[in-house]
Image (cartoon, helix red, strand yellow):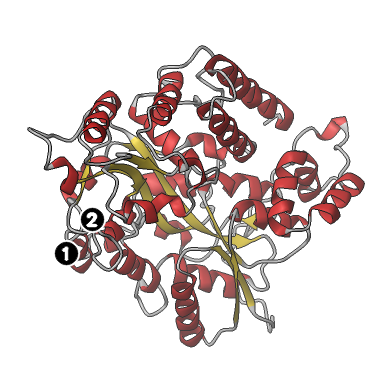
Amino acid sequence: MANDPESLLRAKLTKRRFLTSATALGTLPLVAAVLNACSPPPPPSAAAPTAAPAAGGGAPAQAQGPASGPLKFVGWQYHPEIVEQNVNTFKQLYNEDVSYQLVPGEYHAIAETKLIGGEHFDMMYSEEDHLVRWMKASWIKDIDAMPGAKDMAKLMYPSNVKDLTTPEGKLGGLPYYSGHNAFIYNDQHTSQLQNFKPPTTWQEVMDVSKELKAKKIADYPYLSAWYRTWASLSWSLFSIWYSEGEPVFDDNFDPTFKDGGVAFQKVLEWHKSMFDQGLVQPDILTLQEEALPEYQTGRHTFMVLHDYDQKTMNDPKQSKAAGSVKNALMPGKTHETFIWTAMYLMGGKPISDERAWNMMQFFGGKAKDGQYHVAKRWALDFGLGTAWKEVVEDPEVVAQWKTWRDLDTTTKQINTSRGRGISKALWFPEWDMYMMGAVQDYIQGKTEIGALIKDLYDKAVALKKQYAE
C-alpha cells in the first residue's frame, strides 16, 4: 500500500472508531474486512500522516476548461429542506448543476468512511475539529490562494478566522455558521421562587434545582445534551469546563487534568450528582436532537444549549415555554463558554476549482450579486450566528434576534468565550468520542472518578504519541 496521506490516516484510525462509523452505515462486516485486509500499520519511518500540499500553488484559481458533471456537496441533517432551496438558488444564479447529499446520524464518522472508500466531494460541511484531520488525508485542501480569500478574512471576526485557519496559517474554509453554548432558564418556573436571580455558580444551579423539585414546580429542573454525539455531550462538557476555568488541554495539546485539573473532576462529579439526585430525567443520556424537544415541553427550568436554539424555545408554534425563556451568562468561576465555527470545506480534488469556489462563496460568504443569501437566511429564520460582521450588524438581523433573546447578554457571553484549540490536533476527534462514552459510563455508576480521569488522561497521551504530531 502506498504511503500517501490518505492511506496513512486510514491506518491511523483506531479500529473502534472505524467500526463505529461502519455500524452507523450498516456495513460492519464488509468494512471490518477491508480494514483488516487493506489497512496495515504504516512502516516505522512513517509514524504520522504527512501534511497535504498547500492548495493553489500561489496563483489564483482559473477556470479549468469544460469540466462536466454536477458539483457534489455533502452535509449533516439540519433543515435539509432549506439547504435544498439554497442549492436551487445557487444553481439558478450560477447556471450550475449540484448533487446534494444528506448524511444523517454521526456525520463526521460516516463522512470519513465515505472518504476512505474513495467517494468524491467538492464541498463538505465540517466542524473545526476535522479541518486538520481531513486536510492531512488530502480529502480537502485550503482555500488561501483562491481569488479574494485573503480579503474575506478581514471581514470576519478574529475568533472565527482562527477556527477557520490551519496550523500553517492558511485559510482552510468559509463559515457555515458560528455558535456558542448558552445558559437559559424558564421564567414560568423561576417566577414562582422568592427573590430569584439567575445562578452564578453551578452549585447554585443544583441548589435551585433541588428547590424547584421539592416544590413540585419541575420534576427534572435541569436539562442539557448528554447524548454521545459530537454536538451534544462533548460541547456541553467543554462549555462547563471552560466556565470553571478548566482548559482541559494546554497549547501543546497536552491534557491538564492528570490530578483532577482546575475543575475537570469537579465538573464531572457535578454531572453525576445531578443524575444521582434525580435533578435530570433518567433517560437524559439517550435524548437525541440535543434534547431540544424535551425543553420545548415546558417541563424543565435550566438548560445549556446552542445559543440559536433559544429562538425555537420562544416560538409558540414549537414550545410550551414560549415567551418565558431567558438567557443569562454561564454560571461558573469565569463564566466562559465554548464557541465554535462550523465551516464549508473544499474537496481535495474538486471537479473544478472555479466551480467549487463559486459554490463555497455562495454558501459561505457573499454571492456574485453581492448578497449573503445563505448566512443572512440562517440568521433571520433560525437564529444562527455568523462570522460575517456585515450580517451580524445588519439592522434586520439585530431587530429579529432581539425578539427572542437578550442581545446584550449574548454579546457579553460571546466576549467571554473560548474556542477549542485542541480541535486542531489530528487525534482529538477520537479522544472526544472515547471521552463521551467513558463519561456516560461514569454517570451511570459503572466506574469511579479516579479511574475515569486516569483513563481519559492515558488515552490522550497514547493518541498523541500514536499520531506523533
Q: Residue at x 41, y 20 (%)?
A: 266
Check disc 2: other Cα within 10 Å, few if <14, some if 14-19, many if 20+. many
* Residue 450, placed above or below residue 102: above
Q: Quadrant of the C terminus?
A: top right
Percent of width and height locating residue 204: 24, 26
Residue 129 in percent (x, y) is at 55, 44
Q: Residue at x 29, y 45 (%)?
A: 300
Q: In the drawing, what numbered circle is on residue 399?
A: 1
Query: Which quadrant of the view contains residue 379?
Result: bottom left
Q: Amino acid at mark 1?
A: Ala
From where the camera sits, is residue 49 visible?
A: no
What type is the residue that disc 2 sits on?
Ala
Q: Position of residue 91 (x, y in %)?
A: 51, 84
Disc 1 on helix, strand or loop?
helix
For residue 215, the mark is none
Image quadrant assignment for residue 430: top right
Question: Which residue is tagged 2?
Answer: 321
Please give the count of numbered marks on the rendered protein: 2
Q: Work out whether 73 lies above or below 118.
A: below
